[in-house]
Image (cartoon, helix red, strand yellow):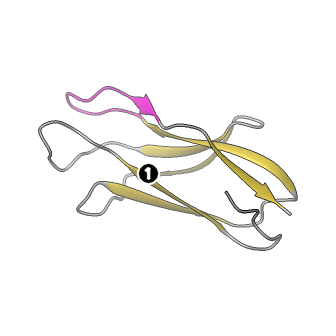
């Protein structure tokens, strides 16, 4: 990851995969692990089951995030790998 300049927005994409492939329902949350703060929650996804998040106003320092799919229908909840954003 390249450092993010102070004042810039951090952008994230979370893709939900299912087998067999289909449109997926249910909420996706972006959680900041440093402080366990819920940053955003949405059910909006494009046709490829990708949810996009844009976070503005992060202070200088290291910020750790995870996207959490809360599950729905026959799909179990799951979390993404941790993403680190360093604001300089």
In the rendered image, residue 69, in percent from the top left (x then y), is placed at: 41, 38
Q: Who is closer to the viewer here, 59 or 41?
A: 59
User: Looking at the figure, which quarter contains the N terminus?
Assistant: bottom right
Farthest-out residue, left: 20
Q: How many marks?
A: 1
Can residue 49 be found in the magenta stretch?
Answer: no
Q: Is residue 71 magenta?
A: yes
Image quadrant holding the C terminus, namely bottom right
Q: Quadrant of residue 78?
A: top left
Q: Is residue 55 left or right of residue 77?
A: right
Q: Which residue in the structure is indicated by mark 1?
A: 14
Mainly helix, strand or loop, the magenta region?
loop
- At x 71%, y 62%, the residue is 2
Q: Quadrant of residue 19?
A: top left
- Image position, residue 44 (x, y; %): 36, 58
Question: Is 72 left or right of 53, judged from the image as shown?
Answer: left
Which range of residues does the magenta coloring cover?
Answer: 70-79
Residue at the location (14% across, 47% down)? 22
Q: As rendered, which of 45 and 88 lies closer to the eye?
A: 88
Q: Residue at x 80, y 71 (%)?
A: 5
Callout 1 crowding tier (Cα within 10 Å): few <14, some 14–19, many ≥20: many
- Residue at point 85%, 59% (across, down): 59
Mark 1 element type: strand
Left or right: 31, with 15 as reference point: right
Please provide percent x and percent y for residue 53.
Answer: 53, 60
């Amino acid at each position: 990851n390249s450092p993010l300049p102070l004042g810039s927005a951090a952008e994230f994409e979370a893709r939900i995969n299912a087998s067999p492939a289909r449109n997926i329902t249910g909420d996706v949350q972006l959680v900041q692990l440093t402080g366990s703060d819920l940053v955003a929650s949405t059910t909006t996804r494009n046709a490829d089951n990708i949810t996009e998040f844009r976070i503005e106003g992060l202070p200088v320092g290291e910020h750790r995030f995870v996207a959490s799919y809360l599950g729905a229908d026959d799909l179990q909840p799951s979390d993404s790998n941790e993403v680190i954003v360093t604001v300089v």
